[in-house]
Amino acid sequence: MTWVCALLVALAGAGPASAHAQLISTDPGQGAVVATAPATVSLTFSESVVIAADGVRVFGPDGSRVDTGHAAARGTASIVGVGLRGSRQPGGAQGTYTVSWRAISADSHPVSGAFTFSVGHPSATRAPGAAAQPRGSATIGVSYAITRAVEFASFALLVGSIAFVLRCWPSAIARQDVRRIMLAGWAALVASTVAALVLQGPYGYGLGVEHLVDPATFSATLGSRLGTALTTRLMLLALAGGYLVLLCAWLEQYAVRGRAWFGALGVLLAAGLASTWAAAGHAAVGLQAALAFPVDVAHLLAMGLWLGGLVTLVVVLHRPISEEPASAAARRFSTVATGSVVVLVGTGCYQSWRQLGSWAAFLTTDYGRLLLVKLAVVALLLVVAAFSRRWVVRRRPAATLRRNVLREAALGALVLVLTALLVNAEPGRTATAAPSGPAHRVVAYDTGGPGGQGRLVVDVDPAATGPNTITIIVQDPAGKPHDVPEVAAALTLAARDLGPLPVLLHRTAPGGHIARAVQIPSAGTWQLAVTMRTSDIDETTVATPIDVR
């Protein structure tokens, strides 16, 4: 299975990043020098995000907060902004401002970062930078991870136990231990869903345990994509509770046709529950979302049928039973498990390709390494399952089957834990993608004449195809802005024989030069060549690579 998934990844190659919002541009841009303080600071993301009121914090040159503390979406959910206090005063405070931000992606995961811009001229700053945003509580983070694992486990227990009764052993519905499994799966899924609703806000916004009962935080969660999915799941679970009552009361009285109707209704409820994960996870955004959504639903259903059915089989085999009922149930479950494995392999390979995108991501990203561990555990699980299937074919003693099935269930529990970790991990495609924000470079120069040494601070925003803002600040060896007689720039993409494309710079402040709406026609690693003239005879050209996505 590992090699099949790896082969599909290699054949497909890299593509656009999927999941986890990325900052693609800001206004003012990274490193920009503006004449007066802007009224607002805006951030544009690659997908819709949820932002807390203080999710965008702006610090002045002296380190003090200068934003209004009321960040909100502007125009679309992918653009957020915050106003600045005192921005209407003439000129505003001169110097470098630091913007620190934290938001929740459409796939429910938090993202954060920081950038700077200057008013009048660059300066030193005492802003706390990235530390300005809260890092969150370790207790909240651990609790959230455990909750996600319990959600998957209880879903598998609920779906798998019902399917086992309907398909493999209908008379087992009369057993109290089987009914307890169904009830335990349903109750645990209800409890973990409520816990996820409570934990999501503090987890996403990086808050402490004291915010678990904060009405404003909880209200923001309810209004998010994940909040909608979780509340929908609770409504479906209410219907599932009634379904379980009817199943336990009437299933024994129905013939095959009646059980088929119960099965059809169960499939609809199970698919609906699985959709609540797909709608607020990696499958809902990014590459091929229209295909990834049903694939994710199928993957979850197959996982539930196999692992939940295994647990049910372990329980019913624990009590002494005659050989024939155990053998018959095991044979039927073997067919279900085989079909589930086929679906899991197919959908798992597609998900691996979609979330990784390259061979390198297997070893260079947390997601890839976790996936390798999960694939190894699943491979071991398949080996154990093969032994169980051999028992079914050869009808060996039930004790042998019980031991093998118990091993399968234990490995299945580990798979569920790894699945929960993968859900929270950043996809490999995103982690290995080209830089998501503006490009920032510092390049030394030396024209050879008196006063001809210094450095260039270069920023390209958003470093993506289309219009870009290029800012170049000339500094002396001490790092202070320094005027020179002439600064010129050009862009070249040698791999596609593009350029040099002239960059029309305009002086904005001592040492500061800017070019707006610079059209970059293609993605790739461009060379930005900057020509410096410090006197009539002293001149040099320096170049720096700019990765454009």
Image (cartoon, grey):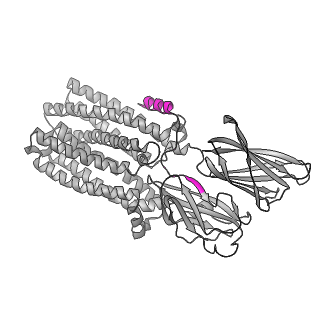
Residue 304: x and y in percent read: 29, 42
Compared to residue 279, the image places residue 365 above or below, namely above
Residue 325: x and y in percent read: 14, 33
Quarter of the image where the C terminus is located: top right
The question of residue 7 being in magenta is answered with yes
Q: Residue at x 16, y 40 (%)?
A: 260
Answer left or right for 354 relative to 397.
Answer: right
Which residues are drawn in magenta?
1-25
Q: Residue at x 49, y 62 (%)?
A: 51
Question: What is the count of numbered marks?
Answer: 0
Residue 214 visible within the image: no
The question of residue 485 being in magenta is answered with no
Compared to residue 106, the image places residue 383 above or below, namely above
The foreground one among 260 and 363 is 260
The residue most toward the left is 253
Answer left or right for 149 relative to 332.
Answer: right
Residue 60 visible within the image: yes
Residue 423: x and y in percent read: 42, 47
Q: Looking at the rendering, which quadrant does residue 546 occupy?
A: top right
Q: Residue at x 42, y 39 (%)?
A: 351
Answer left or right for 115 relative to 169.
Answer: right
Quarter of the image where the N terminus is located: top left
Residue 442: x and y in percent read: 73, 51
The foreground one among 28 and 4 is 28
Compared to residue 73, the image places residue 296 above or below, namely above
